[in-house]
Image (cartoon, rainbow, N blue to C red):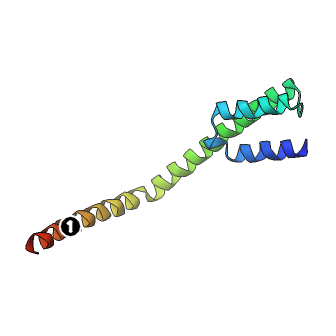
Amino acid sequence: MLKLIESAFLMGLGATSLTAKKAEEFVNKAISDKDITKEEGNQLLQTIIDEGKKAEADLKAKVDALIASRGESILTTYQKVQDLEARVAALEAKLAAKE
């Protein structure tokens, strides 16, 4: 049972990348292996889904905060890199034409 709880905890940590289908498969396997009852399985599945939603919301909030605080500088730097890559490609094309 401890191994099952540990697995569920680890799944909760990675719940943002875990689909509901995979979570359901995990719980159904635990039920069929007689590690947990169907009622416990349903509770575990709901907990995994809820934790996934919380983790997704937390990640979105952190990304939004990062963009709000540094977004403009990040986008400006990205644009500068794009411009430099275009200039390098143009210079490489000129150099290749001269050779």
Circle 1 — which element? helix
Residue situated in front as seen by the camera: 61 or 36:
36
Is residue 59 shown left or right of residue 97? right
Q: Is residue 84 above or below residue 75?
A: below
Q: Which residue is mark 1?
A: 87
Is residue 87 shown left or right of residue 36? left
Quarter of the image holding residue 35?
A: top right
The residue under the point 35% across, 64% down is 77
Residue situated in front as seen by the camera: 99 or 91:
99
Q: Is residue 87 above or below residue 65?
A: below
Quarter of the image holding residue 37?
A: top right
Is residue 83 shown left or right of residue 4? left
The residue under the point 26% across, 67% down is 84
Q: What percent of the width, then of the height, locates residue 19?
A: 63, 35
Q: What percent of the width, then of the height, locates residue 14?
A: 67, 46
The residue under the point 71% across, 39% down is 51
Q: Residue furthest top?
A: 38
Q: What percent of the width, then of the height, locates residue 28?
A: 78, 29
Quarter the N terminus occupies? top right
Quarter of the image holding residue 98?
A: bottom left
Quarter the C terminus occupies? bottom left
